[in-house]
Amino acid sequence: MNTVPNGALLSGELRIGGRLDARFFALLRALQATGSINRAARTAGLSYKGAWLLLETACNLAQLPLLHTSSGGTRLTPAAEELLQAWATLEAEHRDFVRAQEARLVATPALHGLLRRMSMKSTARNQFAGTVSELDIGPVSTRVVIALRGSGEIVATMTTAAAKQLKLKKGKEALALIKASAVVLVSDFAGWKLSASNQLAGTVSRVERGAVSSLVVLTLPGGGAITATVTNEGVDALGLAVGRPASAVFKANAVLVAAQP
């Protein structure tokens, strides 16, 4: 269980005795309120069998009985109520501790910025941090250039409404997200030029071959890395291997931009 809200820098899971966690105590609270294991299980999001498994394990480990069952239903014993109250106190103190530690991180700008960028969860395999260096706002669409840390830049296009929603401006920190499937690898341009706005030259540093396709990772001059999904036939045809030069090519409209509004 995360004890801090989404978007926070720190999270932590609280357990008692290594196995009594938030699920167990949610079940106890529901049982206290309903007097029925069946209804308590549904309230806590557990199956009837799963609820009994949690309760039986805890009852077997406890020195005092936790449940009292009668024809009128199931209720908590004083020992279980004391355990539930202890959990509530510990949970509040743990939440305060996590918040206090997060406040310490906020006071360290470099570390805070790093963790804030890493806290975003996305299925996009390629995520680059940088700052907005150019912003061309049109009536319908907007072109954004993000200067990467180290060297290089990524160009993105989006609707002007989206750019305004993100409150983009020069110098603002932003993230560029690109799916691996949107990246095309080129090993030899043979004198041809491509219309794609993004063409990042690098060196193949890893090839993870699967049954049908491979993940090919290029290391860029600035030290960053970009991953592309390539069919195994494509890997063989292009001669992609560790140490070989290649360029990662992708369109500006394949780039998603994230920013703190």
Image: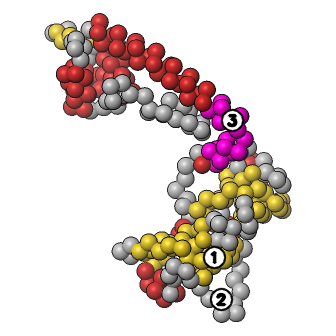
Specify the farthest residue to the bottom: 190
| Residue 106's disc number | 3
Which stretch appears magenta?
A: 102-117
Q: Earlier in the sequence, mark 1 or mark 3?
A: 3
Q: Is residue 126 above or below residue 228?
A: above
Q: Which amino acid does the dot numbered 2 rest on?
A: Phe
Q: Nearer the viewer, residue 84 or 51?
A: 84
Quarter holding the C terminus is: top right
Q: Which amino acid does the dot numbered 1 rest on?
A: Gly
Mark 3 element type: helix
Q: Position of residue 173 (x, y in %)?
A: 75, 51
Q: Earlier in the sequence, mark 3 or mark 2?
A: 3
Pointer 1 local density, CA inside 10 Å: few below 14, some 14–19, many at least 20: many
Q: CA distance from mark 3 to mark 2?
A: 46 Å
| Residue 145's disc number | none
Q: CA distance from mark 2 to mark 1?
A: 14 Å
Pointer 3 local density, CA inside 10 Å: few below 14, some 14–19, many at least 20: some
**Magenta part mainly helix, strand or loop?**
helix
Q: CA distance from mark 1 to mark 3?
A: 35 Å
Question: In this figure, which residue is indicated by the disc labeled 1?
Answer: 202
User: Which residue is at 43% across, 80% downward?
Assistant: 232
Colour mode of the rendering: secondary structure
User: Which residue is at 30% across, 12% downward?
Assistant: 80
Q: Does the magenta portion include 104?
A: yes
Q: Position of residue 253 (x, y in %)?
A: 67, 66
Q: Is residue 261 left or right of residue 220?
A: right
Quarter holding the N terminus is: top left
Question: In this figure, which residue is indicated by the disc labeled 2?
Answer: 189
